[in-house]
Amino acid sequence: MWKYILKRVAWLLLVLVGTAFVIFTVMYFVPGDPADIALPASATFEERQAFRNELGLNDSYMVQLGRYLYKTFIKLDFGTSWTYNVPVMQELFSRMPRTFMLSLITIVLGAVIGIPLGIYAALHQNRWQDHTMMVLAMVGVSMPEFWLALMLVILFCLRLQWLPAFGIGSVANWVLPVITGTVAGIAKNARQMRSSTLETVRSDYISTARAKGVPERSVIYKHMLPNALIPIINIIGAQFGKSIGGTVVLESVFTFPGVGLFLLNSINTRDLPAIRSSVLILAFFTAVVMLIVDIIYACIDPRIKAQYVASGKGRRKA
Amino acid sequence: MNEEFLDIQDLVVTYTSGKAIVHAVNGVSLQLRRGEILGLVGETGAGKTTIAKSILRILPDRSARLAQGKIMLDGQDLLSLTEKEMLEIRGNKVSMIFQDPMTALNPVMTVGGQIAEAVQLHEHVDLNQAKKKTCEMLEMVGIPAERFNEYPHQFSGGMKQRVVIAMALACNPELLLADEPTSALDVTIQAQVLEMINELKQRFNMAMILITHDLGVVAETCQRVAIIYAGQIVEIGTKEEIFRHPAHPYTQGLFGSLPNMNSGAKRLHPIVGMPPDPTNLPKGCPFAPRCPHATDQCRAAEIPMKTLTEDHSCRCLLQTEG
């Protein structure tokens, strides 16, 4: 198992280098000159040229790429933001915890609320509880996040004036972003959990457990739940990864000062060091979360664990 | 004390599937003595498994309905027991072996844990004692006790079936319902498993209902045989009687469709046609549409059970009561 984790960590480094390479290349070829955006319109050609020289933007692609990768991965220097004039990492370190917390809260709430609802619906299959739940889930899944966010802002901030529409000062600021981010997660998890529970209910080993005289409660919690959770964990992991990178929408609607908003602003100002580092840190967190999910997965399902261990030893079980 | 250990009277079970009502079991009555093995033979969908699940009352409660009948076990009316009392019967006095060992074990629990669960539930012992008993059971079915902590995916099909058997026998049941215990296994393993079931049955003097569609298995293990067709017992009797003098045309058809090494025939003789649609059973004898001897009288009304000899009865108008 440890060998497997080690191998995955090595992969993680490779993924980061790959991400750095891709984001650098993409930003290199994207039109728009940072000098035009950073300097006032009245700046002369010489002034612009000096600005470019100072940042090394006149060097060839290979030279710039080499310098960037060397700085980032060998010297761990992530550069200074051109717009804010502060080290990018300093800015990201203050913002990342917020983005991470927002993601974590929405994912945990989505799981904690969505999974029991899905089980409940499955255990009441084809009765009114199930039908109501599935209609609601359908609505939840179909609603675009930004639209829901705007509707909530209109209702709670403008009409009722219960909650602030932007900022980060108090707990109240977190309410709307969390609700917006959670709705789709709850709906997705409930639907997934329902179908995965229904699949488990029909399994032979559930009949075996009943035939052994296991009380119904234990049948559900001990035999059904762990099996029904296996596919869900994978889905929640993917959701988590996606939501860390995907808080951009939430953060920009609610002006929530996280990495997503920072990234968006940096793109608008062609602040290359800020863009690259934001993407890199989002990639890093996503990869770590996926790694953790895979490990949890292995802990629940012995079949997966056996596979990991076997592939770690360089052989696979048929 | 009642001589019959298990006495099923006029059992009727229906399933609802969408708007249609599936008549799975239609008035089955059968008796079983202590220590006896009854073979329940029939095609897929004839209602064999439903009968076994009715005894344990583990039919899906949403779709299945035990419409009518009485199941007496050792003088106790199983259908009038509460769910809580039923839990004490399941896995303890009556246990069941399911058809497919590949899917009958919970993939995320160790095999030892699954057996120990049953022991703990019924013998009210602590975990250590349950483990000890489990190891004994594993050894008894020929699995080294060191494999207690392994998971089902680490076992082969035959080994899994041994685990399932160990689990079913862990609490010394008085009645074992074996639902096609060997169909999913290859022939050599089949023989081993059958031999083991036979041996264990002798040791514990259990009564057993062996559900199968394999007449060879019946010949090897059972004392009595019931032939099921479309949710009805069409013929029941001792193995010798049924194998030597099959009375019902369906039973005759079953034997006729077996390959015979001596006759030199190139082709088998299958029973023509398909079993009737259980949502729309024909009036009268359900086998009449496929029966070469069917008359209008057969299609008119339900056929009563006739006693042919002392322990051989059959639902067919062609037979005369003996």
Image: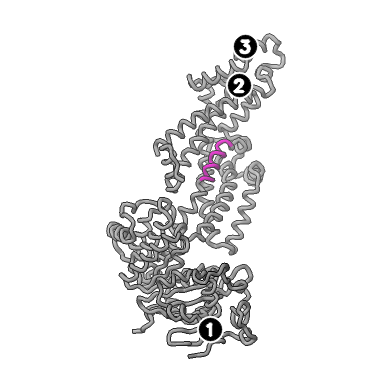
Pinpoint residue A171: horizontal percent, then vertical percent. Answer: 52, 40
Q: Where is residue A247 in the image (x, y as percent from the top left)?
A: 58, 37
Q: What residue type is labelled 3?
A: Asn
Residue for point 41% across, 60% down:
B189
Chain letter behind tag 2:
A
Write down the residue under mark 3: A53
Question: From mark 1 to mark 2, how far is it between C-alphas?
Answer: 94 Å
The residue singled out by tag 2 in the image is A83
Magenta residue span:
A234-245
B164 vs B190, nearest the viewer: B190
Q: Is mark 2 on a helix, strand or loop?
A: loop
Other residues around mark 3 within 10 Å, as few (<14) / some (14–19) / many (≥20) = few
Q: How crowded is mark 2: few (under 14 residues within 10 Å), some or many (20 or more)?
A: some
Q: Name the residue under label 1.
A: B315
Are there few (<14), some (14-19), or many (20+) residues within 10 Å of tag 1? Answer: many
User: B159 or B3: which is nearer to us?
Assistant: B159
Measured as percent of width and height from the top left, residue A242 is found at 57, 39
